[in-house]
């Protein structure tokens, strides 16, 4: 398997549909499926993000993204956390998001390969970003802590939550320094 990095719109339709297909085959299918996202899962950050794609032949089996942001308030769903405008962040920073792995490739190192590729990219990047921020569910914490991430805040989810990737789990806001 190899990782390709794409910037902008080249693969966006394929990536957006792939994300929904991955979620339809998970515990989160009730919130993320082709009924709720008929054109695929995408947002305003996709067109200005670096997309990391794991391909097996021509088949997309994993994807993730990195977006260079200038304000913590640009992070989707940041309002789920307490007083986001008071969070101390060094800007610009990388926003680490949208990990999706095909159901038949889960627990086979695809997520780890995408993590490695994104951290290598950030550490070799020539921008002035010296931090990365992310929102994650609890099952991701062990891997992200191994990459040097630390928990900044957590929030219990409930039925009123707007975060679509969790039902009633706790979500975490994390950051990591990039040592540039």
Image (cartoon, rainbow, N blue to C red):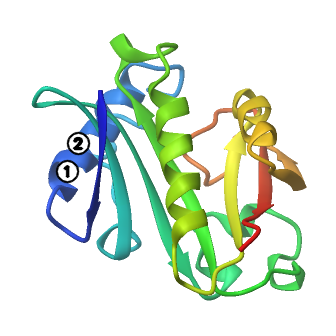
- Between 147 and 104, which is closer to the camera in this rendering? 147
Q: Position of residue 131 (x, y in %)?
A: 72, 71
What residue sits right under mark 1 in the picture?
Answer: 39
Task: Tell whether label 2 touches label 1 (CB within 8 Å).
Answer: yes
- In this view, the residue in front, 159 or 21, is 21
Give the residue number, with chain letter if any, for mark 2. Answer: 17
Q: Which mark is residue 103?
A: none
Report if residue 166 is visible in the image. yes
Q: Secondary structure at mark 2?
A: helix
Q: Is residue 91 above or below residue 15?
A: below
Location of residue 46 by image quarter: bottom left
Quarter holding residue 83: bottom right
Q: Residue at x 25, y 71 (%)?
A: 8
Instruction: Decide if residue 43 is in sight here.
Output: no
Q: CA gap, disc 1 to disc 2? A: 7 Å
Assign the N terminus to one quadrant of the image: top left
Element at badge 1? loop
Question: For the residues carrying marks 1 and 2, which lies nearer the camera in this image?
Answer: 2
Q: Which residue is pictured at 42% across the width and 37% down the height?
A: 32
Report the number of discs: 2
Q: Nearer the viewer, residue 33 or 148?
A: 148
- Residue at position x 48%, y 47% from top? 117
In the visual, does 147 lie left or right of 164? right
Q: Up-down: is 135 above or below 75?
A: above
């Amino acid at each position: 398997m190899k990782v390709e990095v794409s910037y902008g719109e080249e693969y966006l339709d394929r990536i957006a549909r792939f994300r929904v297909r991955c979620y339809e085959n998970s515990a989160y299918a009730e919130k993320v499926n082709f009924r709720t996202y008929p054109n695929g899962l995408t947002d305003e950050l996709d067109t200005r993000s670096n997309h990391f794609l794991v391909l097996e032949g021509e088949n997309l089996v994993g994807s993730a993204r990195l977006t260079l942001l200038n304000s913590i308030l640009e992070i989707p769903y940041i309002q789920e956390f307490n007083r986001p405008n008071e969070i101390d962040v060094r800007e610009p920073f990388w926003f680490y998001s949208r990990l999706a792995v095909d159901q038949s490739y889960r627990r086979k190192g695809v997520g780890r390969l995408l993590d490695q590729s994104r951290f290598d990219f950030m550490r070799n990047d020539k921008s002035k970003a010296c931090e990365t921020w992310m929102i994650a569910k609890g099952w991701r914490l062990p891997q992200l802590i191994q990459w040097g991430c630390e928990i900044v805040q957590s929030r219990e989810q409930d039925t009123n939550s707007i975060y679509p990737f969790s039902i009633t789990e706790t979500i975490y806001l994390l950051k990591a320094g990039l040592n540039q």
